[in-house]
Image: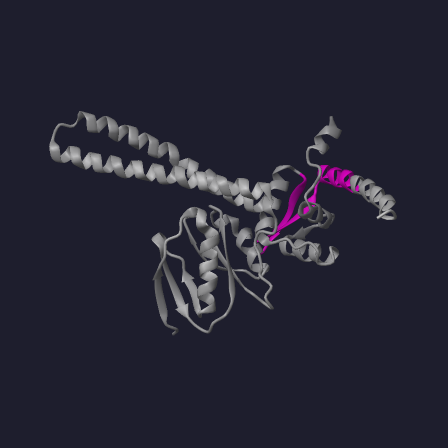
Amino acid sequence: MNEIVNKSKWFWAWQDDKEEEWLGKMSRQGLHLQHPGVFGQYTFEQGAPNEFAYRLDFVTISKKNADYYQLFQDAGWEHVGEVGGWQYWRKEVVDGKVPEIFTDNASKIQKYQRLIGFMVIFFPIYVVLLTNYNNRVSMQSSGFISTLYEITFFLFFVIVMVLVFAMLKIMQRISTLKRK
Amino acid sequence: MVEKDIDKYLPLSEATYYILLTLVEPLHGYGVMQKVESISDGTVNVGPGTLYGAFTTLEKEKLITMVREEERRKSYLLTPKGREVLKEQISRLEIMTRNGQSVLAQL
């Protein structure tokens, strides 16, 4: 059994390229990803240093899309894990030739469009929750309950702001790709 | 108007053009990747993410159709519409090449 190393590192949704780079750097140090975790908790297995290219795709699919995994595996990619629609793929770098899962800008743009499409689904939910909480807070008189509602309201407000910011960042990436 | 219908798919991107060329016979994903690389003399390389997306789009546009699924591998083939689009693209490329050749001597 090889040694297991846990690491915490936070990447935002628009920093997928930074995350890919970091995972590649870890592999050169002999730390090979075992599980990408939720909330930035990564599990690595300590082994011999080897250079891997890590690539992230965003697809929310079910088991019936087995052809997706099969195609990547046929092309020599190993599926390391999935977190909230993010698919972690890796392939060895041979003779300095870095493999890519996306070989043109059009398909990179489509990946970010899928991500935005996914985020948009949650948007109305948050807006409804926000409005609902706002109404309730104004009806409450008790101090403690009122504070509790205010905190929740504030948390939802922060989530919505982060979501809006993330969507803007991703749209920015799309337009940069379109200009290339 | 059939003509107009075809025009909206043109020009095809380099990757899409090569993918469609290989689908003149039924082929699964990895087969497409290998064939594109060999017929383009290694100039065009299609990654699996790009190919999976292209299959989805082209199937939705009814330019290709799934003909077989075995061991989790889907094989696709050009539809009659896909053939028309490809034919039109090839004839446009011929015109482009002809024009290029006539200028090439002066370069």
Q: How many marks?
A: 0
Residue B38's x, y, as percent? 72, 58
Quarter of the image with the N terminus of chain A in it: bottom left
Please name the residue shown 47% across and 57% down the image. A20
Looking at the picture, does residue B73 appear above or below residue B82?
below
Residue A136 seen in render? yes
| Residue that sits furthest to the front in the current view | B107
Residue A75's x, y, as percent? 59, 59
Indicate how the structure is coloured in the image.
Answer: one colour
Reply yes or no: does residue A95 show up in magenta.
Answer: no
Please name the residue shown 49% across and 47% down the image. A59
Quarter of the image with the C terminus of chain A in it: top right
Residue B53's x, y, as percent? 58, 46
Reply yes or no: does residue B89 show up in magenta.
Answer: yes
Please name the residue shown 22% across and 38% down the image. A151
Magenta segment boundaries in residue numbering = B63-90
Looking at the picture, does residue A120 appear above or below residue A75?
above
